[in-house]
Every structure is written in structure tokens, then in C-alpha cells.
Image: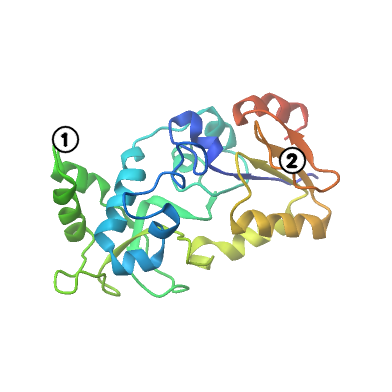
Amino acid sequence: MRKHLFITGAGVSADSGIPTFRGKDGFWTIGSINFTPQEMATRQMYKEKPAEFLHWYFKRFAEYRNTQPNMVHEWLSKKKLITQNIDGLDGKAGNAGYIPIHGRLDKVTLFGNQGKQLELINAPWDELANAIGSDYSDAVLKDLLLDVFRISRITMKPEVDVSLKPFVLLFDEYYTDMYRMSEAVDWLNGATTMVFMGTSFSVGITATALEIAKRNNTDIHIVDPEPIDLGSRGVKYHRMRAAEFIEVAFSLGM
């Protein structure tokens, strides 16, 4: 029996109005005035400049918190799925067991050491949005962010087991079982087919998946209008958007 595993990236959520990460207007292309995205989306930035860090996340991500799933999310809702996306759209579409390997925007945790199992808490984006209203300055927003995320007003830095941190995997962090990494590896090893949709293959989970696929002789399908050439024999490329692949997938018995 074939065991299909789907691994999705930002391209899948583009039709819901969320910019991709590395495209022309992507989250990892457009930084702040003073910092690049690679500098901003780090644990170090959260520790040293929490107001800048939280402001960037609010502007880049929280404004999309009410975005709705598209037809691809709906189609994937009954599939075994690992997603790099933190937008939560797969959960909204009804996929109860999917693995959000890079975290979820709608959750936060207490600030703690990496590797420690921490309780997931509903993110306070709505509370914050209601507090600021529609007319606010960046200074007011940053000040409220410090309060809502419980940043120390004495040190102006986060405190362990007190402050809140967005539940997202940052550039200078590593995969842990908070992000269900062991479970993801089990899924990858158990797959007979891996289908990569809308990913640029720029993150650790895709490297791990490809390594496992090569070792296990797993079938690989790549779905993207401009797919990355992996330079491997036997990879099946589908040069199309994720929504267009649905009909193809039916013909392949996926």
C-alpha cells in the first residue's frame, strides 16, 4: 500500500493572500529599516531587542491571522502533512493531525531554554489589535507589545518563564520535539512517496526529508511553477501551481 506524505511550503498559502517567504515581496526579502529578515527572525534579536522583534512579527505575520484556507488546504485536510508554514491554515481547513514543523502563529510559549517542553498558549494578537484600534503609531504598538508579551520594563529584555515568545522556529534555533521533530522523522521514514509543494528547499526539514528519501528509495514529486532542480534521477517535476496539481494527484491515486 502506498503511503503518501505531503510537505508544503509558503507557495501553498500564496492563493490565500499570504506572501511567500523568498519571492519578490516575500517575508524574507523585505526587512525592517535597520535589520535584514535573517537578523530579525532570531532568538538573539528577541533577547536583545524584543520591541523590534515583536513589532516585525506583528507587522509581517499577525496582520494575516484572519486569513482563510484555500482549495489546496481543503484538499490536504485529509492527507498526512508536514508543513513549513506557521499560518495555521491547514488546521483551519480541518487537518487535525498535521505537523507544523516551524511552529504556529496563533500560539506562544513562555520564554525558556531550547529543547524544554513548554505549554502552548493562545497568542494575544487579537487582544493587541483591539487595544491599538485602527489608528496607532509604531511607538505605541511597540510599547503595547512589550506589555502584552510580558517583557521586563526594568531590563527591557525577556525573562525566562515569564515573558511570552511566538511559537515559531527562528533562524538560530534548532528542531526539537516541541516542533514534533521525532514524529516528523518517523513519518518521513514511513512514506513511500513524498510530495513537496510550494517549497524552495531552503530549510532543514526539506534537507532531512531528501536525505531520508534517498536512503529509502522513496518516490519524490515536486510541485512548483519554477521547481528547484535537485539534480537527482527519478524525481518527478510538476511545473504548476499547487491548485493545478490536485487533478493530477487524483490521476496518480494520491
Asked where in the image residue 79 lies, by quadrant, the reply is top right
**Residue 16, can we see it?**
yes
The disc labelled 2 sits on which kind of residue? His
Q: Residues within 10 Å of mark 1 (few under 14, many from 20)?
A: few
Q: Residue at x 41, y 57 (%)?
A: 41
Of marks 1 and 2, which one's residue comes earlier in the chain? 1
Q: Which x, y percent locates residue 60?
A: 35, 44
Task: Answer with left or right where residue 211 lies relative to residue 86.
Answer: right
Which residue was labeled with disc 1?
134
Q: Which x, y percent locates residue 103?
A: 46, 55
Q: Which x, y percent locates residue 55?
A: 27, 52
Identify the image quadrant of the N terminus.
top right
Asked where in the image residue 254 lies, by quadrant, the reply is top right
Image position of 31 with respect to 222: above or below: below
Query: Which disc is residue 221 wearing?
Result: 2
Q: Residue at x 24, y 44 (%)?
A: 126
